Amino acid sequence: MLKQYYIGDVHPNDLKPESGSKDPSKNDTCRSCWSYWIFPIIGAILLGFLYRYYYPSESKSS
């Protein structure tokens, strides 16, 4: 590493503890992960209904 770009070392208090589990499937940090796929699906369905309501096909309007 170049000395002119060296900023410093990480303080020991800023390091992550080693006692934590490395397996993300066992970790409870993703409690709201269902919202990452439920909300887009509901939004797409809602947009589909709004599109059909505001832009009906030509064959149904006559």
Image (cartoon, rainbow, N blue to C red):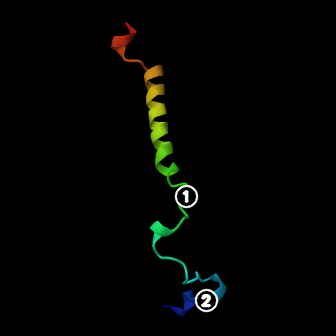
Q: Around disc 2, counting alpha carbons within 10 Å, would you say few (fewer than 14), some (14 to 19), or many (20 or more)?
A: few
- Image spot of residue 31 (x, y percent): 55, 58
When asked about the image quadrant of residue 57, the answer is top left
Q: Badge 1 is on which residue?
A: 31
Q: Amino acid at mark 2?
A: Gly
- Element under disc 1: loop
Q: Around disc 1, counting alpha carbons within 10 Å, would you say few (fewer than 14), some (14 to 19), or many (20 or more)?
A: few
- Image spot of residue 24 (x, y percent): 47, 69
The answer to whether residue 42 is above or below residue 53 is below
Q: Residue furthest left?
A: 59
Residue at image point 45% right, 73% down = 23
Residue at image point 56% right, 90% down = 4
The answer to whether residue 48 is above or below residue 23 is above
When asked about the image quadrant of residue 11, the answer is bottom right
Please tell me the numbered disc located at residue 8. 2
- Image spot of residue 1 (x, y percent): 48, 91
| Labels 1 and 2: the sequence-earlier one | 2
Q: Residue furthest top?
A: 62
Residue at image point 60% right, 83% down = 15
